[in-house]
Amino acid sequence: VVIMEKLQLSINKKIEVLWGQEVFKSNIQDVTEEYMCISIPSKNGEFIPLNKGLEIELFYYDKDVVYKFTSRVIGRKVDGV
């Protein structure tokens, strides 16, 4: 088991959300000291609702390493893009 003090998340990096037994693709849109924003996770044209308070498992890809961690949805943001 490797314990890290701080994971360096990068904008536009690939991230995946484990939803039941399926993996939905997303990417990081923004990163702050307190939170990160991701795009709506999708798979084959299907989107999943990430409602406030939901705990999700994420896979983050960085070079030759894959990180798996649990995160909690703190809100949803609508951006005009």
Image (spheres, helix red, strand yellow):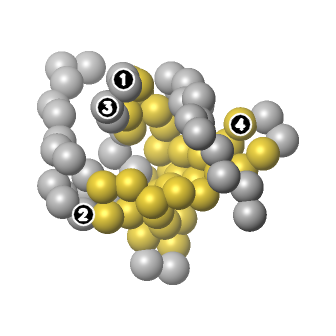
Earlier in the chain: of badge 2 and badge 3, it is 3
Q: Which residue is drawn at 38% across and 63% down?
A: 56
Q: Residue placed farthest to the right in the image?
A: 64
Q: What residue type is labelled 3?
A: Glu
Precedes in sequence: disc 2 or disc 1: 1
Task: Give the residue number, with chain letter if any, for mark 3.
Answer: 34
Q: What residue type is labelled 2?
A: Leu
Of tags 4 and 1, which is closer to the observer? Answer: 1
Let me know if residue 38 appears in the view: yes
Q: Mark 4 points at which residue?
A: 62
Q: Quadrant of residue 2?
A: bottom right
Dots 3, 1 in contact, CB < 8 A: yes
Q: Which of marks 4 and 3 is in front?
A: 3
Judged from the image, the secondary structure of the residue bearing numbered disc 4 is strand
Quick one: 3 or 57, which is closer to the camera? 3
At x 16%, y 55%, the residue is: 52
In the image, taking residue 70 as reference, residue 35 lies left or right, namely left
Judge by depth and name the residue closer to the eye, 37 or 2: 2
Asked whether the residues under the numbered discs 2 and 4 touch, taking CB atoms below 8 Å apart as contact, a structural biologist would say: no
Disc 2 to disc 1: CB gap under 8 Å:
no
